[in-house]
Amino acid sequence: MTFFTRCGFLALVAVLLSLSSQAIAEELPDRGYRWFEVEVLVFRYTDVENADPEQFPKQVVPFNAAASRDLLNDRLQLNLTGFINALPLCEGTRGWVPALRQQMLSPRLLLDEYASFSADSLACRRLPHLPLVASWYEGQQEILSDTLHAVPVTISGRKTGTREELLQAEIPFTVHIDNFRFRQLRQNFERRRDTEVLLHTAWMQPVFNQNVGRKIRLFAGENLSEQFDYAGFPIENTAREELMQSLQLARNAQETTNEDVFASIDFVFNAIDNNEFAFADYRNAENDLPVRPIQQPAGTPENVWEFDGLLDIYLIGNYLHINTDFSLREVITLNPAVRTPEEQLQDFISESDNSLEFLRAYPLRQLRRVISHQTHYFDHPNFGVVIEIRRTPLSARR
């Protein structure tokens, strides 16, 4: 076969494949969904002044993540459940009736189960109700961790958003990085000293009328769940840590003598005479201090991300609308002003400033009517979000 004959044959095959793909796309049912491509770039300012000109409230208001659609976790987390279930059963695996397991398996027998485990049994699977399985697999944090510690800046998919892919899709999906149009803009932000890019992603989604489609959840940056709860307060000490602190306080109280008490009194009087200490009026304290909620509302996100929130894109007639509910979290130091005279004395004697690290949330909630193929910038003193909605072959009303 000559070179030109071979080229002609390959060209013919390519044409036939293209026609076949087009024929398949035409055979797929069109449900009338209006698909659009959305690209988002999130960045934060790194040199924000401590002043808070807009006086954002310190109390954190969570959003409802239960009704949202998460595009990122499927691209970020590794699911090995199918792989584990496909492993052969380990030799000597015995099944126990789950309801009787606790009574039939003595502590000694449980220890024997663990002692018999070796690296050779890694490539086999025990029955799910045996004691070793759940505890051992869940302990492999590097393999089956449910917690992401950070999100990569760029998140993309494999699809490009062809007509066939849109007709086959049931839910929104991330697109290939070749579809990204903010790459130059992202590089510009990365070159600046006062900005840090947190997230750059793009996806295809059907857009419906208001209150019909699900909101898209986006998160980025560092996972702060191990340090703070969602309300922004530091994670409380464990029961063991609380017990050790109580024991230490009890020891200190026993070791305190009358001489120490009188010395503390003289220390305070001398400080007052030298204008080094004065009682603050706690009755007129600041009321903007956050309050730890007894219980978080239903749908509060499990993880605490540096950037998190919802993006709602919908249609009113033929007009696109963007409604943002984002928050940027930042660690600040609170100095509670509500301190009784006894507490103020104790702080002064122990040289404690009573400060508290708090994970503040800076909200960005804006509603805007937009035009497709235009770049829209949502500004905030602490961060910014750039969004562009682009039409696809299935964007028109049908």
Image (spheres, rainbow, N blue to C red):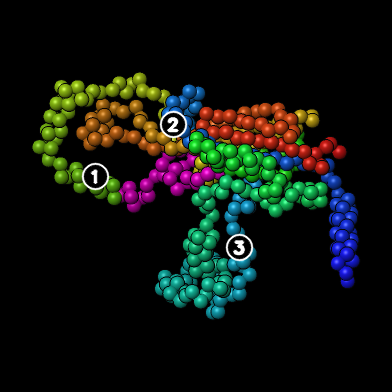
Q: Which residue is mark 3?
A: 81
Q: Which residue is mark 2?
A: 290
Element type at mark 2:
loop
* Percent x, y of residue 219: 57, 43
The magenta stretch is 220-243
For the residues bearing labels 1 and 3, Cβ distance under 8 angstroms: no
Q: The disc labelled 1 sits on which kind of residue?
A: Leu
What label sits on residue 249 in the rendered view? 1
> What is the magenta segment's predominant secondary structure?
loop
Dot placed on the residue nearer the N-terminal end, 1 or 3: 3
Please report the residue visible at 26 percent of the width from the left and 26 percent of the height from the top.
341
Dot placed on the residue nearer the N-terminal end, 3 or 2: 3
Instruction: Tell how many labels.
Output: 3
Task: Rate crowding at label 1 as few (under 14), some (14 to 19) or many (20 or more) other CA atoms within 10 Å.
Answer: few
Q: Which quarter of the picture shows residue 95?
A: bottom right
Please report the residue visible at 58 percent of the width from the left and 29 percent of the height from the top.
379
